[in-house]
Image (tube, rainbow, N blue to C red):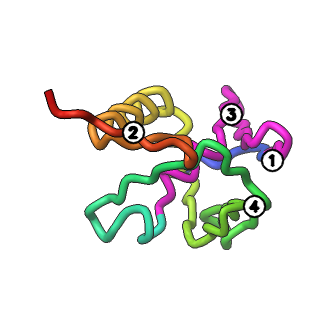
């Protein structure tokens, strides 16, 4: 049985989405949601593509997708991911670990959250 939020609040100014469940409430940043999009563009058909430079991304709107998901539309033009209720709940409850893993992947790849920053590693 899917965990369906009792309330969903889009906060454009703070670039966050709040999911409220009977027992808990979770606030997810647009950047977090964008880099974990379930779309093929991000998931790469089983070989995920590291998303970089998304620190400033915001959510422009959210739309229901039937009775099973939300379509999140980001201000960078990305809008092809359907976030199922189960996937949103997993993102919410595993947010801390997923974010730490994402930051580690960025570091390992020598990439940045900031689109205006380029990381150069010098050989020693």
Residue 21 in percent (x, y) is at: 69, 36
Asked whether the beta carbons under mark 1 and mark 4 sit within 8 Å of each other, the answer is yes
- Residue underneath mark 4: 62
Give the magenta-colored segment's residue range.
9-38
Q: Is mark 1 on a helix, strand or loop?
A: strand
The residue shown at (34%, 67%) is 44
Query: Badge 3: few (under 14), some or many (20 or more) residues near its Cα, within 10 Å?
Result: some
Residue 29 on the magenta span: yes
User: Going 75% across and 42% down the picture, which residue do you hit?
Assistant: 15
SS at mark 3?
A: strand
Residue 99, given in percent of the width and then of the height, sits at 46, 33
Picture coordinates of residue 39, whole percent (x, y): 47, 67
| Left or right of 1 on screen, residue 50 | left
Q: Which of marks 1 and 4 is nearer the N terminus?
A: 1
Mark with earlier residue (1, 3): 1
Q: Tell me, yes or no, whether the two marked residues, 3 and 2, touch with CB atoms within 8 Å.
A: no
Q: Which of marks 3 and 2 is in front?
A: 2
Residue 100 is one of the magenta-drawn residues: no
Q: Nearer the viewer, mark 2 or mark 1?
A: 2
Asked whether 95 or 66 is in front, the reply is 95
Distance from Cα at disc 1 to Cα at disc 4: 8 Å
* Residue at image mark 3: 27
Q: How far apart are marks 2 and 4 (CA)?
A: 33 Å
Q: Determine which residue is flagged by label 2.
A: 119
Mark 1 sits on what residue?
Answer: 10
Q: Is residue 62 above or below residue 19?
A: below
């Amino acid at each position: 049985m899917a965990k369906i939020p009792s309330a969903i609040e889009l906060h454009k100014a703070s670039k966050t989405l709040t999911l409220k469940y009977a027992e808990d409430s979770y606030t997810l940043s647009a950047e977090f949601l964008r880099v974990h999009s379930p779309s093929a563009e991000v998931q790469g058909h089983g070989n995920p593509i590291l998303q970089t430079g998304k620190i400033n991304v915001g959510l422009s709107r959210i739309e229901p997708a039937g009775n099973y998901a939300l379509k999140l539309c980001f201000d960078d033009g990305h809008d092809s991911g359907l976030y199922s209720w189960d996937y949103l709940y997993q993102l919410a409850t595993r947010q801390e670990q997923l974010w730490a893993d994402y930051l580690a992947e960025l570091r390992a790849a020598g990439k940045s959250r900031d689109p205006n920053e380029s990381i150069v590693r010098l050989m020693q």
